[in-house]
Image: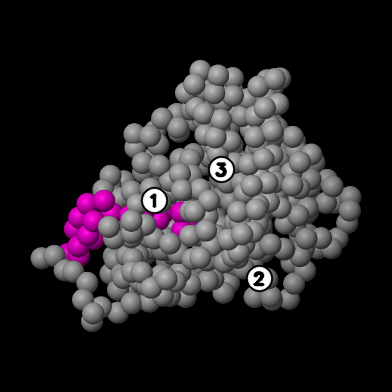
């Protein structure tokens, strides 16, 4: 029998910030105890559903009755910052599009992120990781891993993929960080304006002088044929540039922290480097840095385990809740690099599953392997990880500094 929400249903405010860099919010355990769906209140008082179970998450993320269109009435607005971002980019390429439009755009850029293309890129990925690891060693301890390694490695990689000059990485890193973390709508708008102006200039340059990389290909193939307009090319480049380094940078820094906080698992990895692919999958599951990527709105009624999601209801599918579901992962709060975790939803699920997942996996495997090889005595240079400030709940989860020594 369908069950609709009543005033008696208990609700919680959502989202809640993490208190530990690598653990989900404390309320997630309570949510799981309330069934596959629970009702939550957002910052502005609007209500939404949170999905707590792995199977339910996969089923709903593949359901065409849930829309990623941020302009749809009822779409969850998780914070004032999130609302400001939507005002700036109501039609964010790929992530805020529904089929069939989503598929058209995805196919335009898919070639750069296939397994075959990533395999071709691996020598470049290793060269990049070794460059920054060598710089780290030459500078000597102590160091902050985030600006010296975790950020520049994926930044240089995505620059190479897109054809963006790496000399400008400080600019787009700082602008991207303001866009992702600022709570001030005016600052978000100003930062995005700077990014759009920079990328628009790059599009102009590639029209006059084509070069390597995805942006040049979009200009010469799609823009020139009228398949994309200039605004679309700039928006696509903006999304890929920011998303292409932010999530992987967070994963690198949090992965190092998690391994150092679990020395028995790090010892296994050091003694058996062939375990790195398995370790990366477990890190992706355990950390779930893109926790709130699965934000949707129902465009039709959906019945789920006796509860009714009505058309217009907001639906939030946190990756960390699905990835800590004991029905899908035995003892899910235990970090175990020998676990078979490839079925995690750290990259989402359905048509919106992360475009860059093959590249992200390769970057993580190579970056962590090179770092552990070059720094065999790597350790934390902070007494308590709770001293490390964690990012806001509504952005990519991570830390902005990680003091290390060796």
In the image, residue 382 sits, relative to residue 338, either above or below, namely: below
Residue depicted at x 68% and y 32%: 202
Which residue was labeled with disc 2? 389
Secondary structure under the numbered disc 1 in the rendered image: loop
Q: Relative to 3, is 74 on the left or the right? A: right
**Callout 2: few (<14), some (14-19), or many (20+) C-alpha neighbours within 10 Å?**
some
- Gap in angstroms between the C-alphas marked 2 and 1: 32 Å
In the image, residue 145 sits, relative to residue 90, either above or below, namely: below
Q: Position of residue 36 (x, y in %)?
A: 29, 65
- Asked where in the image residue 38 lies, by quadrant, the reply is bottom left
**From which residue to which does the magenta span run?**
289-311
Which residue was labeled with disc 3? 239
Is mark 2 in CB contact (under 8 Å) with mark 1?
no
Q: Residue furthest left?
A: 1
Q: Is residue 153 visible?
A: no
Secondary structure under the numbered disc 3 in the rendered image: helix
- Gap in angstroms between the C-alphas marked 2 and 3: 26 Å
Nearer to me, 358 or 95 = 95
Is mark 2 in CB contact (under 8 Å) with mark 3?
no
Which residue was labeled with disc 1? 71
């Amino acid at each position: 029998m369908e069950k609709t929400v009543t005033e008696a249903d208990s609700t919680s405010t959502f989202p809640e910030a993490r208190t530990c860099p690598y653990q989900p919010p404390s309320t997630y355990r309570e949510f799981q105890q309330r069934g596959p769906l629970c009702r939550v209140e957002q910052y502005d008082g609007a209500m939404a559903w949170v999905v707590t179970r792995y199977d339910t998450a996969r089923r709903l993320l593949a359901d065409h009755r849930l829309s990623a269109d941020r302009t749809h009435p009822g779409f969850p607005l998780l914070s004032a910052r999130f609302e400001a971002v939507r005002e700036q980019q109501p039609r964010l390429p790929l992530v805020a599009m529904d089929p069939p439009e989503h598929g058209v755009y995805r196919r335009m850029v898919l070639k750069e992120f296939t397994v075959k293309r990533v395999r071709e890129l691996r020598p470049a990925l290793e060269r990049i990781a070794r460059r920054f690891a060598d710089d780290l060693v030459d500078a000597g301890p102590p160091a902050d891993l985030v600006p010296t390694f975790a950020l520049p490695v994926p930044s240089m990689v995505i620059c190479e993929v897109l054809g963006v000059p790496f000399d400008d990485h400080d600019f787009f890193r700082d602008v991207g960080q303001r866009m992702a973390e600022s709570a001030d709508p005016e600052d978000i708008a100003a930062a995005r304006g700077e990014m759009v102006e920079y990328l628009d200039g790059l599009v102009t340059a590639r029209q006059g002088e084509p070069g390597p990389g995805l942006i040049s290909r979009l200009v010469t193939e799609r823009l020139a044929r009228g398949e994309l307009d200039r605004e679309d090319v700039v928006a696509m480049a903006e999304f890929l540039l920011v998303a292409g380094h932010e999530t992987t940078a967070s994963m690198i820094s949090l992965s190092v922290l998690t391994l150092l906080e679990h020395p028995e698992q790090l010892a296994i990895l050091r003694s058996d480097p062939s375990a790195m692919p398995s370790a990366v999958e477990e890190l992706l599951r355990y950390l779930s840095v893109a926790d709130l990527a699965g934000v949707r709105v129902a465009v039709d009624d959906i019945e789920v385990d006796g509860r009714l999601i009505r058309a217009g209801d907001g639906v939030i599918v946190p990756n960390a809740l699905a990835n800590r579901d004991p029905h899908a992962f035995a003892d899910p709060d235990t970090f175990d690099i020998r676990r078979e975790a490839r079925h995690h939803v750290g990259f989402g699920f359905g048509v919106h599953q992360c475009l860059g997942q093959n590249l992200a996996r390769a970057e993580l495997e190579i970056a962590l392997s090179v770092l552990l090889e070059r720094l065999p005595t790597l350790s934390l240079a902070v007494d308590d990880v709770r001293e490390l400030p964690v990012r806001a709940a509504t952005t990519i989860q991570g830390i902005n500094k990680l003091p290390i020594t060796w």
